[in-house]
């Protein structure tokens, strides 16, 4: 039976759950609760043991109530439809707005525009980098400077008002 069932597409309209419960989009939480209780009693599987469609309808009613009863999920559903609920499930409720902003046409255009003026990054293998460093050292004609500060060395800002530093090595 599941193979023959058509998979629902994700909508951005956000109206289907309201139709399932038979309420308007501006319905209050009390209206939603009242409609849910009425429909849940009508389609409960225990009251309709011979009707398998009633069990499916009951699941659909429960799902609609669970979403529309939660203020955060209802807000997401109202703004972005079932696609918004799917995104919230995948990335978290707090990231839904960010997802839709970043997937908008103008954000994509901005990314493309900002990426055009930059140089292309290239890969340098560690072996090539090491060879280049050794070549530069040979051309400089001397040993590389390898001086590390000692534990007794301190650096202080000079007190004459200039922005320069004085290093006391302790060898005075």
Image (cartoon, helix red, strand yellow):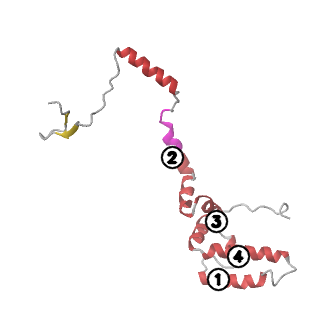
Q: Residue at x 55, y 47 (%)?
A: 108
- Crowd class of label 4 (few under 14; some 14 to 19; many from 20; radius 10 Å): some
User: Label 4, label 3: how many angstroms apart (C-alpha)?
Assistant: 17 Å
Please name the residue that numbered disc 2 is placed on: 110
Q: In the rendered image, is residue 162 in sight?
A: yes
Residue 11 location, quadrant: bottom right
Q: Nearer the viewer, mark 1 or mark 2?
A: 1
Element at label 2: helix
User: Label 3, label 2: how many angstroms apart (C-alpha)?
Assistant: 26 Å
Q: Residue at x 63, y 74 (%)?
A: 68
**Label placed on residue 81:** 3
Query: Over which residues does the magenta segment extend?
Result: 110-119
Mark before the other along the chain sequence, 1 or 4:
1
Question: Measured from the top left, where is residue 102 in percent x and y?
Answer: 54, 53
Is residue 118 on the magenta stretch? yes
Pick whichever, 20 or 53, lies toward us. Answer: 53
On screen, 104 above or below 125?
below
Quarter of the picture containing the C terminus is top left
User: Label 2, label 4: how many angstroms apart (C-alpha)?
Assistant: 42 Å
Q: Nearer the viewer, mark 1 or mark 4?
A: 4
Question: Measured from the top left, where is residue 138 in percent x and y?
Answer: 39, 15
**Label placed on residue 33:** 1
User: Label 1, label 2: how many angstroms apart (C-alpha)?
Assistant: 44 Å
Q: Nearer the viewer, mark 3 or mark 2?
A: 3
Please name the residue that numbered disc 4 is placed on: 62
């Amino acid at each position: 039976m599941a193979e023959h069932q058509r998979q629902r597409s994700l909508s951005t309209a956000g109206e289907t759950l309201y139709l399932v419960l038979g309420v308007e989009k501006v319905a209050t939480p009390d209206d939603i609760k009242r409609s849910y209780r009425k429909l849940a009693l009508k389609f409960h599987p225990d009251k309709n043991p011979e009707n398998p469609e009633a069990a499916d309808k009951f699941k659909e009613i429960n799902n609609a109530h669970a979403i529309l009863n939660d203020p955060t999920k209802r807000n997401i559903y109202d703004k972005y439809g079932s696609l918004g609920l799917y995104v919230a499930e995948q990335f978290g409720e707090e990231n839904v707005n960010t997802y839709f902003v970043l997937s908008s046409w103008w954000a994509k255009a901005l990314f493309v525009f900002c990426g055009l003026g930059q140089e292309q990054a290239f890969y340098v293998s560690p072996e090539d980098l090491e060879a280049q460093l050794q070549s530069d050292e040979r051309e400089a004609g001397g040993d590389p400077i390898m001086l590390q500060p000692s534990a007794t060395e301190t650096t202080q800002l000079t007190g004459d008002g200039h922005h320069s530093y004085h290093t006391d090595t302790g060898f005075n």
